[in-house]
Amino acid sequence: MADDFAQKTTDFLQWFRAIPGVWINPKVQLTDLRVQGHGRGLVAVDDITVDEDLFTTPRVATLTASTSKLTQQLALATLEPFSEQQWLLLILLLIYEHLQGSGSFWQPYLDILPHSFDTLMFWSKDELCELQASAICGKIGRSEADKTFRTEILPFVKSHAEAFYPTGVKNLDDEELLALAHRMGSTIMAYAFDLEQQSSSAHVDEEGYATEDEEQMPKGLVAMADMLNADADFNARLFQEKSSVTMKATRAIRKGDEIMNDYGPLPRADLLRRYGYLTPKYAKYDVVELSRDLIVDALKNHHTIDDGEITTRIAHLEDRDQAEEAYIIERDAGDTDHPNNGIIFSEFPEDLVLFLKTLLAEPEEYKRVSKLDEQRQSQLMIDVGRIMAEVLRRRVDQYKSSITEDTELLRDQTIQGRRRMAIEVRLGEKEVLKEAQAYASSIVLTYEPNSSGKSTERSQKRRKLN
C-alpha cells in the first residue's frame, strides 16, 4: 500500500538521522520510484558536483557481527565456526534481528528491505526454462543452499533458541526457518557490502596499496547505501573510511537525476541471478560460456586426433594452469567508469586460442606452441577460426529460439516480469554469439594465404593470441 510504503520510508529516515555521525547532503532525497519500477531510490534535488559527498553512514549503522546484539547474546566462541563463512554469519544475524521484531534496533531499516525477490533462486522450473541454454541456469545453487541451510543454519538456530526467540514468540518450524534463511540470503546477495576491517590487517604491497582477501572480509548491510539502485552508467560510489563509509558522486549529477551505484561489469544473466532485475545498459557486459566438451567435439569434427592424445594435451595445459572446464567469450567493454555504447565483439580469450592451438598442433609442436614461427601461427589461426565457427554454430543451436523470434517477442508489451527478463538475457547472449561468429569468419579471411602464398593480414589489428 502507498501509505505503508511512505510511512516505512519516513520511519527509516527518522531512525537513520538519529544515529550519531550520520550526515545526508540536503541535495539528495530518498524518493518513491515505483512508477519507474525502481522501488525506492536516491534522487538529486539540486545540481551535484563531481566528488561531492552524498551521505555518510557511521560504522555503527552498518549491520555486522560487531553491531548485532546476537554477539552479545552468545559467546563469541559459539559463533566461531562461522567466522570464515561471512555469508552464513550474516544470515544468522539477520534472522536474529528479524525475530526480535520491535525489540531490534534495526527494525526500521529491515522493514524497508524487500521481503520477496525476483532473483533466479525463486523462479519456478517453467520460468527458468525461458532462459533456454543460458549457462546461468547451472549457477543458481538452490539445492546447495538448501543443504547448507539445513545442515548449518537450522541446527544452530534450534540449538540456541533461547537467544533467537524473544519471550512469547513461537519457534519457526523447519520449512519456515528455511524460507527465512533463503530470504535473508537473497537480501545479502542483493544488498550487502564487503567491508574493510576497521583495524586492518591487510597486506600492503610495494606500491603502498592495501589488499585483503574478499572471501574473509566481513560482510555487512550499510544503511542508506543500499537504497541506491545501480546501473552500468553509474554516477556514485561508496568509499570506506576508518569509522564511516561515504557515498560520493563520481561525476556531475543534474537536479532530478537518480543517483546510481556501481555493481561492476556484470553480465545481465548475473545481474538477474544476484539482484533480480535488468537494465539495458548492462547489455555490453553480456557473455556466453563455451564448455570444454563442446569445443573438443567441434574440433574432432574438423581435425583427426584420438581421445588419448586429447587427454594428454589437456593434461599438459592443466599442469600449467592453462586449461579451463569452460571458456567465457565477451565483448571488450572497457572500464566501468567510462560507459561505451556500440561495443562489439573483437577477440577470443587468449586461453581459449591457446587451448585450440595446443590440440591442433603436430605432436612435436604442442608443448611449444607459443614459440612457433609466424607462418605456422597463421596456419593454426585459420583452423582456430574454422573450428570456432563450428563451436559457435553448435552453441547457437542449443537455444530454442532465434534472435528474430526473441526480438519479435519483446515487441509484445503484454510480456512482462520474469518472462520478459529471461527473453532479454537469452537474446543478449545470442547477440554475443552472432558477433563472435562474424569474428571467427574474419580470422579465416585475415590469415588465409592469398595468391602469392602469404597471409592477407587484412586491416584487422594483429593481437597477441598466445
Image: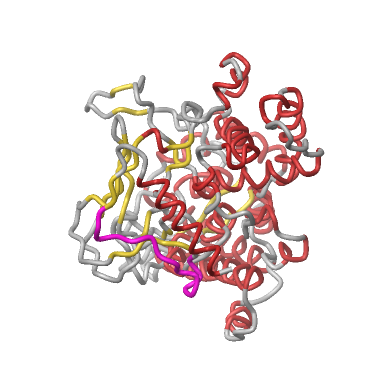
The percent coordinates of residue 253 (x first, y second) are: 24, 64
Q: Can see residue 382?
A: yes
Q: Is the C terminus in the top left, top right, bottom left or bottom right quadrant?
A: top left
Q: Which picture quadrant has residue 149? A: top right
Is 51 placed above or below 35 here?
Answer: above
> In the image, is residue 110 part of the stretch drawn in magenta?
no
Q: Is the N terminus in the top left, top right, bottom left or bottom right quadrant?
A: bottom right
> In the image, is residue 26 part of the stretch drawn in magenta?
yes
Is 466 placed above or below 424 here?
Answer: above
In the rendered structure, the answer to whether residue 10 lies left or right of residue 198 reads: right
Q: Can see residue 135?
A: no
In the rendered structure, the answer to whether residue 36 lies left or right of residue 403 reads: left
Q: Which picture quadrant has residue 2? A: bottom right
The percent coordinates of residue 416 (x first, y second) are: 62, 76
- Which residue is drawn at the image coordinates 32% and 39% (left, top)? 245
Residue range (magenta): 25-38
The percent coordinates of residue 377 (x first, y second) are: 43, 50
Relative depth, front residue between 435 and 189: 189
- Which residue is drawn at the image coordinates 64% and 50% (left, top)? 291
